[in-house]
Amino acid sequence: MPRSLPSARTVAVLLLLVVGVGFSFSFYATVDGASVTYTATAVEPGENPELVTRAASNVTNLDERIAGTSTQHQRPIQRAAATGSYTGRLDPELDIVIDDIESPYIWYNESYYTWTVSTQSETTNATIRMQPTDPDTVFETVARPVDDAPAEVTTAIAEGTATGLTVEYGLYQQNGEYYVVAPESEGAVLAQLGKIFAGFVLTPVGRGYTAVAIGLLAYRFRGPICDRSLTVRRAITIPALAISIALIGTVLFESGSLTRFVTGPTSAFVVAAGTVAGVAAARRQWLQLVGVSIGTALVAIGAFVAAIGVVGAIFGILAVFLGFTTGIVPFGYGYWFAQPVPKD
């Protein structure tokens, strides 16, 4: 007798299980694979100001900052550079651009300057002070000794390049010579951090999907299936299972803050709760659908607040938004499994 093929529902649940398990380890995969190439470039005082200002936090490229500001609004800067200071009103466009410059030095119009700016509270009136200074003074003040630098910086200077995720780039000095250590690609660090963040976000999503898949598999192969369409009461066990799976994952694979034992399982719970909402929608139980949605959101936000404090409300809202968005998949499974089960 030929073997019967798995039903479409069984295949769909198995696929969800594979995706869920894969997502559950996405954070660890992105962290292990995260690497950025940093280069060390020898520079002399006055050379490569664009490279120096990009790497050294104590020097700001003012030319680059105000490049998008109209010429007439740059006049306070021009006045301060010519006379040493400017006191008066700043156009809001310029005020916004220079408001957060806290470095003691700037590069402007092919020269280095000392820089201070003070603004009057709740106004655009400011005092800007700029005094020309020589590149040697800037380099001597800003450069850090290589002897005190992390090993990755020493490697980059000795070999020309080094790999890592958060190498302390900047201007370094060794034996009277200066080196700029910076990422080979400006967007590489942000790209890697973005991947890690995506992995961090997808981990509880994966655990929620895994719980949905395991719960539906257990339900599917429990007794006669022809009369066992999913109900809201039966589906409630799936979000509870998500909490258990997330807690086990946290114990086995994570360390650090105890808040992860709350935030991770809570996020997985919100994702898996989409199954209950899907069942309620399929059965036209609108009050239960609204109740599940509101209740899930309140539980999640309350858990984040309890774990983190008042700021947890913001992260809780974000977790709810993410959970409801990615919970569309469990919602679809819940809707589907609430329908009468065809005979296989």
Image (spheres, grey):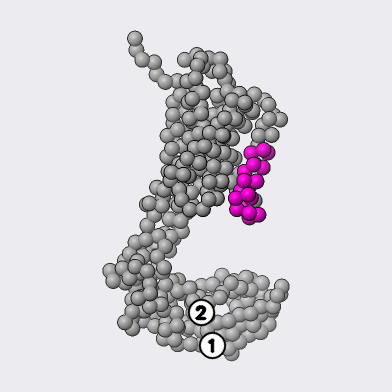
Front-lying residue, 287 or 149: 149
Question: Which quadrant, please, contains the N terminus?
Answer: top left
Mark 2 crowdedness (10 Å alpha carbons): few <14, some 14-19, many ≥20: many
Quickly name the residue at label 1: 131
Element type where label 1 sits in the image? strand
> Which residue does the image show at 34% across and 61% down from the upper left?
163
Q: Is residue 310 visible?
A: yes
Contact flag, marks 2 and 1 (Cβ < 8 Å): no
Q: Residue farthest to the top?
A: 1
Kindly identify the residue that appears in the image at 62 percent across and 46 percent down: 303
- The single residue placed furthest to the bottom in the displayed view is 83
Q: Could you say whether the residue bearing mark 2 is in a helix, strand or loop?
A: strand
User: What is the distance, in whole Å, between disc 2 and disc 1 at their CAs?
Assistant: 10 Å
Residue 2 at x, y percent in the picture: 34, 12
The percent position of residue 290, horizontal first and vertical second, equals: 69, 34
Question: Observer-nearest residue: 267 or 53?
Answer: 267
Q: Which mark is residue 91?
A: none
Q: Tell me which amino acid carries mark 2.
A: Ile
Of the two numbered discs 2 and 1 on the same chain, state the one appearing first in sequence.
Answer: 2
Q: Magenta stretch: residue 308 in it?
A: yes
Q: Residue at x 34, y 73 (%)?
A: 41
- How far from the left and from the top, in percent, is residue 232? 62, 26
Q: Residue at x 45, y 71 (%)?
A: 54
Amino acid type, residue under disc 1 in the picture:
Gln
Magenta-colored stretch includes residue 188: no
Q: Is residue 225 above or below residue 35?
A: above
Residue 206's place in the image compared with 89, above or below, is above
Which residues are drawn in magenta?
294-312
Residue 326 in view (yes/no)? no
Residue identifier under label 2: 106
How would you classify the magenta stretch by its main secondary structure?
helix
Question: Around disc 1, counting alpha carbons within 10 Å, would you say few (fewer than 14), some (14 to 19), or many (20 or more)?
Answer: some
